[in-house]
Image: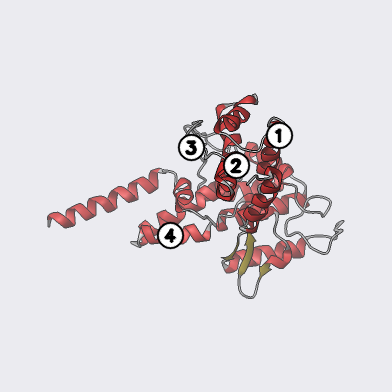
């Protein structure tokens, strides 16, 4: 039985998207791969897939990403008709991912960043950036999740925020009463803008429309330069995304201080941060002097208890 590879690709993408995956880059790469196959080709081979992945200029990491898009598609076709696709083994192109060391903010630094918005930016943008920084610091949201929030996503009576994360996954994030008041005060302070849609964005730019992510990150760097935050070994310039790392680390620090189960706290963070895999949560738990000291103290206390 022969398989129409393009129809199989459309079916594969539709099935994966039904599970919540967006696959924008995967769709482009899969059809580019099919375009590169010789006319009349009815089967996917490992050689064809690797040849496509490595034909593009770029880093080994990019080659690995191209092959990673083709590999599950080939498995899908193989499931439909084994003769129509060879299974592509894992590890054919090895690209190590180097994670950037996050900048962990202190409470005083977060307060300074929020305060400095008023001296660097115009009032409307200052209010928006101050709200954004505060929201990221106390919730651990991804910055993209914060940019996408609408006013209807907040339930002030229940102190809940409805957040849509990666792959369209939705979760409810509880808010402290002070955070609810901060968000309500920000909404009250906003003057009428050029809102053109029925969905009202929570965070707005100077024109009253939804805050642009790239613009917001550039504004944040302006604020950072005014604060002159101390450099940290291995860290680049502080980023908005580093508030998420700081939130995760501080959550673990609180667990140690309270004598609570660290494993239980990590399990809660998996859901709270919107992760599908606990491995992703552990990545956010970067070492900090305070966290290492608390962990060491607990180990010492445990060993002393065993000896007594």
Q: Residue at x 58, y 35 (%)?
A: 67
Q: Determine the CA span between mark 1 and mark 2.
A: 13 Å
The residue nearer to you, when weighing 158 against 118, is 158
Of helix, strand and loop, which one carries label 3?
loop
Q: Quadrant of residue 47?
A: top right
Sequence-earlier tag: 1 or 4: 1
Sequence-earlier tag: 1 or 2: 1
User: Quadrant where the C terminus lies?
Assistant: bottom left
Residue under label 1, please give it.
40
Q: Residue at x 56, y 58 (%)?
A: 139
Of helix, strand and loop, which one carries label 1?
loop
Q: Determine the CA span between mark 1 and mark 4.
A: 51 Å
Residue at the far bottom in the pictured view: 157
Residue under label 2, please give it.
84
Query: Are the residues flagged by discs 1 and 4 in contact, CB closer than 8 Å?
Result: no
The residue nearer to you, when weighing 103 against 262, is 262
- Disc 2 or disc 4, which is closer to the eye? 2
Q: Residue at x 47, y 58 (%)?
A: 269
Q: Determine the CA span between mark 1 and mark 3.
A: 25 Å
Sequence-earlier tag: 2 or 4: 2
Residue under label 4, please give it.
267
x, y (%) of residue 89?
A: 48, 37
């Amino acid at each position: 039985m022969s398989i129409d590879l393009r129809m199989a690709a459309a079916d594969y993408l539709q099935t994966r998207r039904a599970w919540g995956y967006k696959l924008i880059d995967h769709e482009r790469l899969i059809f580019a791969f099919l375009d590169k196959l010789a006319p009349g080709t009815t089967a996917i081979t490992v050689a064809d897939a690797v040849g496509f992945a490595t034909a593009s200029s770029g880093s080994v990491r990019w080659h690995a990403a191209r092959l990673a898009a083709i590999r599950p598609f080939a498995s899908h076709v193989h499931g439909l008709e084994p003769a129509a696709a060879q299974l592509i083994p894992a590890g054919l192109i090895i690209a190590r991912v180097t994670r950037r060391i996050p900048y962990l903010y202190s409470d005083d630094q977060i307060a300074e960043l929020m305060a400095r918005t008023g001296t660097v930016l115009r009032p409307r943008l200052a209010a928006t950036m101050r709200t954004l920084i505060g929201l990221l610091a106390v919730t651990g949201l991804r910055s993209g999740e914060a940019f996408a929030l609408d006013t209807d996503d907040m339930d002030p009576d229940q102190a809940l925020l409805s957040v849509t994360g990666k792959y369209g996954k939705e979760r409810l994030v509880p808010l402290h009463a002070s955070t609810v008041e901060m968000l309500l005060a920000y909404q009250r302070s906003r003057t009428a803008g050029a809102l053109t849609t029925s969905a009202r964005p929570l965070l707005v730019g100077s024109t009253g429309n939804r805050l642009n992510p790239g613009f917001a990150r550039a504004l944040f760097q302006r604020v950072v330069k005014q604060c002159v935050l101390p450099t940290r070994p291995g860290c680049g310039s502080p980023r908005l995304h580093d508030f998420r790392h700081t939130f995760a680390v501080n959550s673990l620090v609180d667990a140690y201080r309270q004598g609570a189960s660290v494993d239980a706290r990590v399990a809660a963070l998996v859901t709270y941060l919107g992760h599908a895999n606990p491995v992703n949560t552990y990545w956010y738990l970067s070492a900090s002097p305070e966290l290492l000291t608390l962990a060491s103290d607990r180990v010492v206390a445990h060993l002393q208890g065993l000896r007594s």
